[in-house]
Image: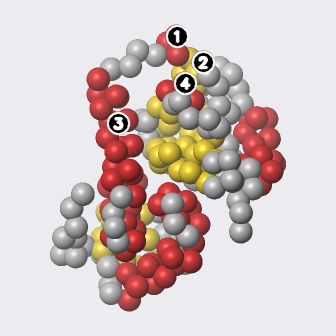
Amino acid sequence: MKNEPLLDRYPSLVLVADKKLVKIPGQIQQFPRRAYLPVMDESLWKIHSGAVQSISWREDGTHVSLGIWGPDDLIGHAISSINPYYLECLTPVKVTLVPLNDWSPDSNFLIEHIYQLEMLLAIRSCKRIEEMVLQLLKLLSNKFGRVGTQGNIIDLRLTHQDIADLLGTTRVTVTRILQKLEERGVIERLSIRQIILKDSDFWHYQI
Protein backbone atom coordinates (compact mmCIF):
# COMPACT_ATOMS: atom_id res chain seq x y z
CA MET A 1 0.00 0.00 0.00
CA LYS A 2 1.27 3.45 -0.92
CA ASN A 3 2.76 5.36 1.98
CA GLU A 4 1.02 8.57 3.01
CA PRO A 5 2.90 11.82 3.60
CA LEU A 6 4.31 12.08 7.11
CA LEU A 7 2.01 14.86 8.32
CA ASP A 8 -1.03 12.85 7.22
CA ARG A 9 0.19 9.67 8.89
CA TYR A 10 1.34 11.14 12.21
CA PRO A 11 -0.16 14.61 12.75
CA SER A 12 -0.59 14.14 16.50
CA LEU A 13 3.01 13.06 16.98
CA VAL A 14 4.33 16.10 15.17
CA LEU A 15 2.19 18.29 17.43
CA VAL A 16 3.56 16.55 20.52
CA ALA A 17 7.06 17.60 19.53
CA ASP A 18 6.00 21.18 18.77
CA LYS A 19 4.26 21.62 22.13
CA LYS A 20 7.24 20.28 24.05
CA LEU A 21 9.74 22.54 22.33
CA VAL A 22 11.64 24.84 24.69
CA LYS A 23 13.82 27.18 22.65
CA ILE A 24 16.58 27.49 25.23
CA PRO A 25 19.99 26.42 23.87
CA GLY A 26 21.79 23.93 26.09
CA GLN A 27 18.72 22.93 28.10
CA ILE A 28 18.01 19.20 28.00
CA GLN A 29 14.64 18.44 26.45
CA GLN A 30 12.86 15.10 26.43
CA PHE A 31 10.72 13.68 23.64
CA PRO A 32 8.76 10.42 23.67
CA ARG A 33 9.12 7.52 21.29
CA ARG A 34 7.55 8.27 17.89
CA ALA A 35 7.59 12.02 18.43
CA TYR A 36 9.17 14.20 15.76
CA LEU A 37 11.83 16.72 16.68
CA PRO A 38 11.11 20.22 15.38
CA VAL A 39 13.33 20.93 12.38
CA MET A 40 14.94 24.36 12.31
CA ASP A 41 17.30 25.76 9.70
CA GLU A 42 19.39 27.73 12.18
CA SER A 43 19.85 25.08 14.88
CA LEU A 44 20.90 21.47 15.36
CA TRP A 45 19.93 18.87 17.94
CA LYS A 46 22.58 17.14 20.05
CA ILE A 47 21.47 13.71 21.21
CA HIS A 48 22.31 12.76 24.81
CA SER A 49 20.36 9.51 24.97
CA GLY A 50 18.13 7.49 22.70
CA ALA A 51 17.93 6.95 18.95
CA VAL A 52 16.65 9.27 16.22
CA GLN A 53 16.05 8.47 12.57
CA SER A 54 16.39 11.15 9.90
CA ILE A 55 13.89 10.51 7.12
CA SER A 56 12.42 11.92 3.94
CA TRP A 57 9.67 11.01 1.50
CA ARG A 58 9.68 10.65 -2.27
CA GLU A 59 6.92 12.18 -4.37
CA ASP A 60 5.17 8.82 -4.59
CA GLY A 61 5.05 8.61 -0.79
CA THR A 62 7.92 6.13 -0.42
CA HIS A 63 9.70 6.34 2.94
CA VAL A 64 13.45 7.07 2.73
CA SER A 65 15.65 6.58 5.78
CA LEU A 66 18.62 8.97 5.75
CA GLY A 67 20.36 7.67 8.88
CA ILE A 68 20.01 6.52 12.46
CA TRP A 69 21.67 8.59 15.15
CA GLY A 70 22.50 8.19 18.82
CA PRO A 71 24.30 9.75 21.80
CA ASP A 72 26.74 12.58 20.99
CA ASP A 73 25.51 12.86 17.38
CA LEU A 74 24.50 16.27 16.03
CA ILE A 75 21.60 16.23 13.60
CA GLY A 76 19.36 18.66 11.79
CA HIS A 77 18.27 20.07 8.46
CA ALA A 78 21.01 22.68 8.71
CA ILE A 79 23.55 20.02 7.70
CA SER A 80 21.38 18.30 5.10
CA SER A 81 20.32 19.28 1.59
CA ILE A 82 17.37 16.87 1.54
CA ASN A 83 13.77 18.10 1.38
CA PRO A 84 11.47 17.20 2.99
CA TYR A 85 13.45 16.36 6.12
CA TYR A 86 12.12 14.92 9.39
CA LEU A 87 13.60 13.59 12.63
CA GLU A 88 11.70 10.70 14.20
CA CYS A 89 12.43 9.52 17.75
CA LEU A 90 12.75 5.73 17.60
CA THR A 91 13.06 5.65 21.39
CA PRO A 92 12.51 8.19 24.16
CA VAL A 93 15.29 10.74 23.68
CA LYS A 94 17.06 13.52 25.52
CA VAL A 95 18.43 16.31 23.34
CA THR A 96 19.68 19.87 23.53
CA LEU A 97 19.28 22.65 21.02
CA VAL A 98 22.53 23.91 19.46
CA PRO A 99 22.31 27.18 17.49
CA LEU A 100 24.57 27.21 14.44
CA ASN A 101 26.13 30.43 15.71
CA ASP A 102 27.40 28.52 18.75
CA TRP A 103 28.62 25.50 16.81
CA SER A 104 32.15 25.04 15.52
CA PRO A 105 32.33 21.80 13.50
CA ASP A 106 35.59 19.91 13.75
CA SER A 107 37.11 17.23 11.55
CA ASN A 108 36.15 14.42 13.95
CA PHE A 109 32.47 15.34 13.69
CA LEU A 110 32.59 15.46 9.89
CA ILE A 111 34.45 12.15 9.65
CA GLU A 112 32.03 10.38 12.01
CA HIS A 113 28.98 11.84 10.27
CA ILE A 114 30.19 10.78 6.82
CA TYR A 115 31.21 7.36 8.16
CA GLN A 116 27.73 6.65 9.49
CA LEU A 117 26.08 7.73 6.25
CA GLU A 118 28.46 5.56 4.22
CA MET A 119 27.89 2.55 6.46
CA LEU A 120 24.13 2.64 5.89
CA LEU A 121 24.67 3.14 2.15
CA ALA A 122 27.06 0.18 2.04
CA ILE A 123 24.60 -2.02 3.94
CA ARG A 124 21.81 -1.17 1.51
CA SER A 125 24.06 -2.12 -1.40
CA CYS A 126 24.38 -5.73 -0.20
CA LYS A 127 23.08 -8.06 -2.89
CA ARG A 128 21.53 -10.56 -0.49
CA ILE A 129 18.74 -9.34 1.78
CA GLU A 130 19.88 -11.69 4.57
CA GLU A 131 23.34 -10.14 4.52
CA MET A 132 21.72 -6.70 4.54
CA VAL A 133 19.70 -7.47 7.67
CA LEU A 134 22.70 -9.02 9.42
CA GLN A 135 24.92 -6.05 8.70
CA LEU A 136 22.27 -3.65 9.97
CA LEU A 137 21.94 -5.64 13.19
CA LYS A 138 25.70 -5.54 13.59
CA LEU A 139 25.70 -1.77 13.05
CA LEU A 140 22.90 -1.29 15.60
CA SER A 141 24.67 -3.62 18.02
CA ASN A 142 27.91 -1.64 17.80
CA LYS A 143 26.19 1.73 18.16
CA PHE A 144 23.36 1.02 20.58
CA GLY A 145 23.90 -2.48 21.98
CA ARG A 146 24.86 -3.52 25.48
CA VAL A 147 26.74 -6.66 26.42
CA GLY A 148 24.67 -9.56 27.74
CA THR A 149 25.49 -13.12 28.74
CA GLN A 150 24.73 -14.53 25.27
CA GLY A 151 25.71 -11.61 23.07
CA ASN A 152 24.93 -7.97 22.43
CA ILE A 153 21.42 -6.81 23.29
CA ILE A 154 19.86 -4.32 20.88
CA ASP A 155 17.14 -2.77 23.00
CA LEU A 156 15.83 -0.10 20.64
CA ARG A 157 12.54 -2.02 20.44
CA LEU A 158 12.37 -1.54 16.69
CA THR A 159 9.40 -2.92 14.81
CA HIS A 160 9.86 -4.99 11.68
CA GLN A 161 8.60 -1.98 9.75
CA ASP A 162 11.32 0.20 11.32
CA ILE A 163 13.99 -2.23 10.13
CA ALA A 164 12.38 -2.45 6.70
CA ASP A 165 12.36 1.35 6.42
CA LEU A 166 16.05 1.55 7.32
CA LEU A 167 16.89 -0.97 4.60
CA GLY A 168 14.43 0.11 1.94
CA THR A 169 12.68 -3.26 1.86
CA THR A 170 9.33 -4.66 3.04
CA ARG A 171 8.11 -5.62 6.49
CA VAL A 172 7.19 -9.11 5.25
CA THR A 173 10.75 -9.66 4.02
CA VAL A 174 12.27 -8.52 7.30
CA THR A 175 9.94 -10.79 9.28
CA ARG A 176 10.95 -13.76 7.14
CA ILE A 177 14.68 -13.07 7.48
CA LEU A 178 14.51 -12.54 11.25
CA GLN A 179 12.65 -15.83 11.65
CA LYS A 180 15.35 -17.57 9.62
CA LEU A 181 18.15 -16.01 11.67
CA GLU A 182 16.44 -17.03 14.90
CA GLU A 183 16.05 -20.60 13.68
CA ARG A 184 19.77 -20.69 12.91
CA GLY A 185 20.63 -19.40 16.37
CA VAL A 186 22.21 -16.17 15.14
CA ILE A 187 19.74 -13.98 17.04
CA GLU A 188 17.21 -14.31 19.82
CA ARG A 189 14.12 -12.12 19.91
CA LEU A 190 12.59 -11.14 23.23
CA SER A 191 8.95 -10.31 23.86
CA ILE A 192 9.64 -6.59 24.23
CA ARG A 193 11.13 -6.28 20.73
CA GLN A 194 14.68 -6.60 21.96
CA ILE A 195 17.07 -8.54 19.76
CA ILE A 196 20.09 -10.41 21.06
CA LEU A 197 22.81 -10.68 18.43
CA LYS A 198 24.59 -13.77 19.68
CA ASP A 199 28.32 -14.27 19.84
CA SER A 200 29.03 -16.39 16.81
CA ASP A 201 31.53 -17.19 14.08
CA PHE A 202 28.70 -16.50 11.66
CA TRP A 203 30.04 -13.05 10.85
CA HIS A 204 32.02 -13.82 7.72
CA TYR A 205 30.46 -10.97 5.77
CA GLN A 206 32.60 -7.89 5.41
CA ILE A 207 31.50 -4.50 4.11
Instruction: Give me the residue at 51% from left, 66% from top.
Output: 169
Residue receiving disc 4:
78
Distance from disc 2 to disc 3, alpha carbons, whole Å, reads 21 Å
Q: Secondary structure at mark 2?
A: loop
Residue at the image position 74 percent from the left and 50 percent from the top: 5
Q: Nearer the viewer, mark 4 or mark 1?
A: 4
Secondary structure category for the residue under label 4: helix
Label 1 sits on a secondary structure element that is helix
Task: Give the class, few, some or many, for how many residues have Cα within 10 Å of label 2's Cα (few <14, many ≥20).
Answer: few
How packed mark 4 is, by other alpha carbons closer than 10 Å (few <14, some 14-19, many 20 or more), is some
| Crowding at mark 3 (Cα within 10 Å: few <14, some 14-19, many 20+) | few
Residue type marked 1: Asn
Colour mode of the rendering: secondary structure
Q: CA distance from mark 4 to mark 1?
A: 12 Å
Q: Which mark is residue 183?
A: none
Q: Is residue 30 visible?
A: no
Q: Residue at x 32, y 79 (%)?
A: 186
Cα–Cα span, label 1 and label 2: 8 Å
Residue topped by disc 2: 42
Disc 2 from disc 4: Cα separation: 6 Å
Other-residue count near label 1 (Cα within 10 Å), few / some / many at <14 / 14–19 / ≥20: few
Quadrant (top left, top right, bottom left, bottom right) of the N terminus = bottom right
The nearer-to-camera label among 2 and 3 is: 3
Residue 108 in picture, x, y percent from top left: 29, 28
**How many marks are shown on the rendered structure?**
4
Q: Residue furthest top?
A: 101
Q: Earlier in the sequence, mark 4 or mark 3?
A: 4
Q: Which residue is mark 1?
A: 101
Mark found first going from the N terminus, 2 or 4: 2
- Mark 1 or mark 2: whose residue is earlier in sequence: 2
Residue linked to disc 3: 114
Side of 105 where 43 appears, left or right: right
